[in-house]
Amino acid sequence: MKPHFLHFPPTLALLVCFLPTAWSQQTTASGTTAPDEEVFQMQALDVTSSRDVGYISQNAESATRMNVPIADVPQSILVFNQEFLQDIMAESIEDVAMYDPTVNAYSDNDDFTMRGIGGNARLRSGANYFNGFEQIPGLGSQTLVNTERVEMLKGPNAVLYGTGAFGGTINRVSKKPTSRKFTRVTAGLDSEGYYSVAVDDNSPVVPRKYAYRINAMWGDGETWYGMQRNSVVFAPGISWNITPRTILMVEYTFQKQKQPANWEFPVWGGDILNIVTRIDPSDVGIRHRVNPRRYLAEPGDFRNVYRNIFYADFRHEFSRNLIFRAMANAESRKIESKETLIESWIVTMTEDDAWVRRYFRQNDSDCLNYRLRGELIAQFPTFGLGHKMVSGLGWDKGRWDYLQLRSLNSDQTANPEMGLYPFPSISMLTGERRRTIPEVNFQAQPFTDYTQDMDSLSAYASDLITLVPDRLILQAGLRYITFKQTRDYATSPEDNYTITEDKFTHSVGLVWHLTKNRAWTLYANHCFTYKPNSQVDDDGEESDPLDSMTADQNEIGLKYVYKDKFSALLSYYDINQKNTPESYIEYAVNPDGSNISRTRWGLIKGLRSRGAEMNFQWNASEELSLFGGYGYNHCVNEDTGARHYYAPMHSFSAFGRYGIRRGALKGLSFNLGFIWRSSTVLQYQASTALADRPMWSVPSYQSINAGVSYGFRTSRKVRWSVAFKLSNATDHLNFYNTYNTRASLQAPRTWTLSLVSSF
């Protein structure tokens, strides 16, 4: 059954409940004359990169949904602006987010831990948002082609962003049409033969009335392990100044990704790079060096991901101090996946060789979400206090259709009718990465087949209250959420369930500008959020939905800003997450001798994540810009006291650029980036009736990225730039998805060359 559009609820009619009783006639930023490039924006709401200096962005819109100085927000916020995105030649969210020392990527599907929380998609940590709307998680990485800036909001953000996002929120702000005509064309080529062309074209149709902007990209080539990948993005947008006080913006994004399937490799004996073959455990055995860049799937395996995102934003300014805003978002995501995976927990061992079995998996999913939001943004005084308030209603409707087929977990003796599996042996595990395994046809059976429906309605308000002008600001927010989720399993009707809940979330914070010039700022906050669990507790008798997750955070921090030259932040946080879902794979042996596996879910008491972070941005001179940060985190499982997986205790990120502005070498620029994460704990896969695999320590992550570029003009209007980037320059072995039985390797040393023309 396909998703269908539901009728718009009476959101706008209910907005009158949030009308402020009075508002002043004080001057606001929206009342000033906008620069030509900002004519299609409202300065009270929108932050533009044109006001940034180097990598320093002093304002952000994600935290309050208003254009507010970061110093006035009682929260840790990190902004990666367009200049930074271009300098690092970012292709994915991971390329950007890993420069935040509180973030760690654990897959290539935009999965992150933030402030130690995460490591499992159900934890909703490091949640991805686009223009303030949550995007459907899953396979594939979302495009940056039409992204102007990436704003990182630390800690729970449920008041304005709804449920979840315990560790933080990653919000991408799209490129908006402007009144300035320009075109930017980028051609790229990397060391694996992947080439791409991207276009960013902006033009006013009627000056100061209509404008369009089109971002598009096409790429095709191979991955670092020799499999084909390609990508297509088409993202047009229009802006219409209906009246001097009324603006409508409409955007659409189409993204298609064809990427290789799973490239995991098995891990035996807790040694990620070696296999020791022996019959008697007391024997020394024979040590075989494994090539972790060996591809063990079929040449024809693939994952196709299709996304369609519609976004509309209507604003009307009743006065300088009262703005109505209505936003709509519709997103569809379709996945077609066929892949062959290693069954790494089953090993056949001889004196001088070893085999690991494989199985076939087909994943097909079709998801569609609708989201509506209506808001009032008001500035007004009450009893001598100044208010900047956002209040509104939100409505979400979603439907997921999911089907997984997979071959039986059995060997040739248990199910002869299925034929022989082509076991990858040591000769294949130690061979060249492009060596292929003979194709085989797997017979598949339905493994998981379900439909999930979700409805949510919420009302919220957040207020920045000026207690003492330019000195003391109080932030307070409250959100009420009603939530209903139904899941129907075709393969296991006994697991069907319906969740109906309602909940309040809140946040409160205080900002104290210690000096009159607002250079030094002390802040503190407390916030609470929740997320319904989408899994069931299967004890073999009756399946019940797991209790909802909750989390609260306490944070204190110090900010320093010196004009547009230097900014820094130091903060301490304590996050307490309850009812944390944990998945484990139960392995067993049937009476007939065949092996089976099943994913089960349960709750742990929770996660306790405490830590500190420091970051800075420094325009040291006209030529030199520096950015960096350090994070300390100690996140533990409250049931066991053990560290949480995928959460490094120490993290460091830094980036610097030196550009020559004068003389014969004018236009030449050098940059250097360094990302380091300390060793992490891996996710453990338990087993039943089979010997457990030992734990092993995930090596530290290290990536040194160096770049050089040269910009020049061929005319007054045409500018060119040639750039070269060397990623992971030391060819360090970095890992994704680490378990005690298997792991995935990240990209080795690669280079990228780009040619950019702007006119």
Image: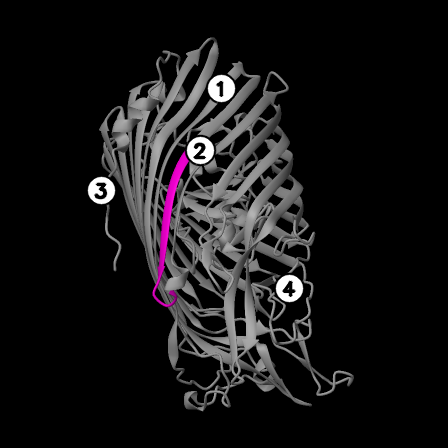
Q: What residue type is labelled 1?
A: Ile
Which is nearer the N-term, disc 2 or disc 1?
A: 2
Tag shown at residue 465: 1
Depth check, mark 3 against mark 4: the one in front is 3
User: Where 292 sits versus 76, above or below?
Assistant: below
Could you say which quadrant of the image residue 276 lies in? bottom right
Residue at 66% in and 89% down: 350
Which is nearer the N-term, disc 4 or disc 1?
A: 1
Q: How far apart are marks 3 and 1 (CA)?
A: 36 Å
Depth check, mark 3 against mark 2: the one in front is 3
Which is nearer the N-term, disc 3 or disc 1?
A: 3
Q: What residue type is labelled 4?
A: His
Indicate the position of residue 217 as horizontal and vertical percent values.
Answer: 35, 56
Tag shown at residue 732: 4
Along the horizontal axis of the image, is 521 left or right of 453? right
User: Where 20 sits versus 645, above or below?
Assistant: above
Tag shown at residue 61: 2
Along the horizontal axis of the image, is 590 left or right of 42? right
Depth check, mark 2 against mark 1: the one in front is 1
Task: Give the extent of the magenta segment.
Answer: 479-492
Q: How far apart are marks 2 and 1 (CA)?
A: 17 Å
